[in-house]
């Protein structure tokens, strides 16, 4: 699929927004990436937008992970357990997602976003346990939520951070700043798994992904700094939820209109 120079420029701008958001809240990167690919850059095939954004978000998540690791906000054992279980789910989910109508996929994606946003707002005053770790007592819950998140991530072609962050908090009671940093381990793994599966079907625009990733590196540096400043008072959770509601509303409007015309 060939694009115009302006579309690649918009891809770089979109990447910077996604990188900033991904580093800021650990999720929202892919929430923004898919609609930006479709509605701003102008990728006509939703499946190509999903496959390309999965690769770009994985790379941008890895960049954001470096910043959080330096800040000491990543709980590696939890991240690796969650990611390991989720990769299996992401492989299964992405296989199913490729066979599903693209516009229906975007509509369902938006509905899931709203549900998660409500759940996050309900728990925004819970600051978590700073010393929380993954152990024998909570490992089954971490594995179960990791696999379930992986299925959603693969099916919708997203990194899944907006699901991973609440999943980590629910299973370990860690503070949101740790959940954000730790989630990037799983976002990277899920995104690469989904992109690989879509790439096998020719549903990844590699040039656009490269431009998107380049823009995301710059955005990710600023997002990591902002995350540390907002994490202590519940503001980060509120920002996270408002972002989800805003994009979900727009996606429902656009995908419903496309379904009505089809």
Image (cartoon, helix red, strand yellow):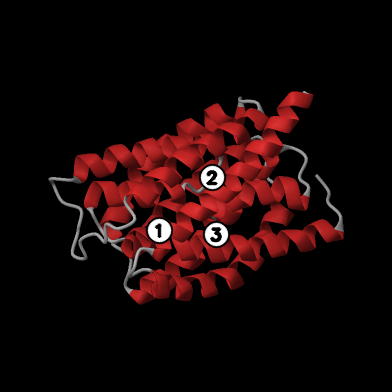
Q: Quadrant of the C terminus?
A: top right
- Circle 3: element type: helix
Label 1 and label 2: CA atoms lie apart by 20 Å
Horizontal relation, residue 91 to residue 254: left or right: left
The percent position of residue 176, horizontal first and vertical second, equals 33, 60
Residue appearing at x 62%, y 52% in the figure = 33
Disc 2 marks which residue?
Answer: 158
Question: Are there few (<14), some (14-19), or many (20+) residues within 10 Å of tag 1?
Answer: many
Q: Quadrant of the N terminus?
A: top right
Q: Determine contact: label 2, label 3, CB under 8 Å.
A: no
- Circle 2: element type: loop
Mark 1 or 2: the one toward you: 1
Q: Say if 13 sits above or below 261 in the image.
A: below
Mark 1 or mark 3: name the one nearer the start of the chain.
Answer: 3
- Looking at the rendering, which quadrant does residue 149 occupy? top left
Mark 1 or mark 2: name the one nearer the start of the chain.
Answer: 2
Residue appearing at x 58%, y 50% in the figure = 246
The percent position of residue 201, horizontal first and vertical second, equals 65, 34
Per the rendering, the mark at residue 59 is 3
Can residue 171 be seen from the camera position used here? Answer: yes
Per the rendering, the mark at residue 237 is 1
Residue appearing at x 58%, y 43% in the figure = 248
- Between 144 and 254, the one lying in front of the other is 254
The percent position of residue 57, horizontal first and vertical second, equals 56, 55
């Amino acid at each position: 699929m060939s694009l115009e120079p302006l579309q690649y420029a918009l891809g770089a701008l979109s990447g910077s927004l996604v990188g900033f958001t991904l580093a800021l809240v650990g999720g929202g990167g892919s929430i923004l990436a898919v609609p930006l690919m479709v509605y701003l850059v102008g990728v006509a095939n939703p499946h190509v937008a999903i496959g390309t954004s999965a690769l770009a978000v994985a790379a941008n998540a890895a960049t954001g992970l470096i910043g959080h690791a330096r800040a000491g906000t990543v709980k590696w054992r939890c991240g690796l357990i969650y990611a390991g279980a989720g990769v299996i789910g992401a492989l299964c989910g992405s296989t199913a997602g490729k066979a599903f109508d693209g516009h229906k996929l975007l509509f369902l994606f938006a509905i899931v976003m709203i549900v998660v946003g409500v759940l996050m707002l309900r728990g925004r005053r819970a600051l978590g346990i700073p010393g929380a770790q993954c152990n024998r007592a909570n490992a089954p819950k971490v594995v179960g939520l990791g696999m379930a998140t992986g299925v959603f991530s693969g099916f919708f072609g997203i990194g899944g951070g907006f699901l991973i962050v609440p999943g980590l908090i629910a299973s370990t009671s860690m503070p949101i700043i740790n959940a954000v940093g730790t989630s990037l381990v799983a976002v990277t793994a899920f995104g690469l798994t989904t992109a690989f599966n879509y790439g096998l079907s020719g549903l990844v625009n590699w040039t656009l992904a490269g431009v998107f990733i380049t823009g995301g590196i710059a955005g990710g540096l600023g997002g990591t700094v902002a995350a540390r400043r907002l994490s202590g008072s519940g503001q980060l959770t509120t920002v996270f939820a408002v972002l989800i509601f805003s994009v979900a509303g727009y996606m429902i409007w656009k995908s419903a209109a496309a379904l009505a015309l089809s």
